[in-house]
Image: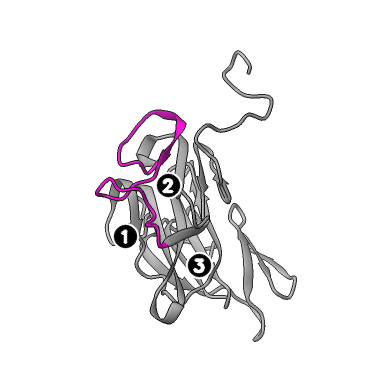
Amino acid sequence: GMADNSVRFATVVAGIVGATGIALGAESSCAWNTRSDRTWSLRCWGGGANGLLGDGVVTGWGAIPQNVVDERGVAWPPADTFITKMAISAVHLCAVLTRTRDAGRPTQEVWCWGNGTGGELGVPSPLAGAYSPRHVMGVPDDATVQSIGNRYNNSAGGASTYVIATDGRIWSWGTWAFGRPMTDPRTMSSTVTFTPTLITISPLAASEWIISISEGNPTCVLTNHARVLCG
């Protein structure tokens, strides 16, 4: 340890045993456990402003990992589901939840929590803070999520989320400093999209689709043809 409270060497995070995935953000971190015999599913620690820890309350800093809970205070996600991916910005978090439904068919859902004043949570109206996960309606159950990402633009004071499905479909919502989230970064407006919007990035060939996005100024995408498009 150092005098400035930073850590210069690896240290074991208390309360995290059996983790199968991690996600790190500027203010907070999370780990999840998908093992069949798990005693915990999702725990977060770090900055708790805007409800980032998902533990049902707003805290300053949480050095000890806390269980993410639903609005009833019950550990989330449920035992018959598991987390497959997460994305964390400075003001909100999103997770991809997988569950098995009809005839054993797995489906995926997107859930977000934290600040929602700029549409970051994918709910129909502004929300100052969601201290527990909220289901994002608008990304269909048949979408197999290949990638999810959150971005916070400090100068614009807003954040956005995108989801890429394995079939190339892309949804985005929130505030994008250079226009509607991920639609056309060259459109210099400040539109807020509160619910997921299916978007198109062009020009793409008939057999070409997006496999990865890197948001910034500019925003760039990588296609299955190994092309990089920026705008």
What separation in Å lies between label 1 and label 3 (alpha carbons)? 19 Å
Mark-to-mark CA distance, 3 and 2: 21 Å
Mark 2 and 1 residues: CB-CB less than 8 Å, in contact? no
Q: Which residue is mark 3?
A: 183
Q: Which residue is mark 2?
A: 92
Out of 230 and 98, give the one closest to the viewer: 98
Instruction: Give the crowd class for mark 2: few <14, some 14-19, many >=20 residues within 10 Å.
Output: many
Disc 1 to disc 3: CB gap under 8 Å = no
Q: At label 1, which amino acid type do we have? A: Val
Mark 2 residue element: strand
Q: Residues within 10 Å of mark 1 (few under 14, many from 20)?
A: many
Identify the image quadrant of residue 198.
bottom left
Amino acid beneath label 3: Thr
Dot 3: element: loop
The range drawn in magenta is 53-80
Residue 79 part of the magenta segment: yes
- Above or below residue 180? Residue 48 is above
Q: Against 69, is 220 above or below?
A: below
Q: Residue furthest bottom?
A: 206
Which image quadrant: the C terminus? bottom right
Q: Considering only order in the chain, which callout, 2 or 3, is on the residue closer to the N terminus? A: 2
Q: Secondary structure at mark 1?
A: loop
Q: Which amino acid type corresponds to the residue marked 2 in the rendered image?
A: His
Q: Residue at x 46, y 59 (%)?
A: 82
The residue identified by callout 1 is 123
| Residue 147: numbered disc | none
Q: Is residue 27 magenta?
A: no
Residue 196 seen: yes
Q: Compare residues 104 and 22 and report the one nearer the observer.
A: 104
Image coordinates for residue 63, horizontal then vertical, percent:
47, 28
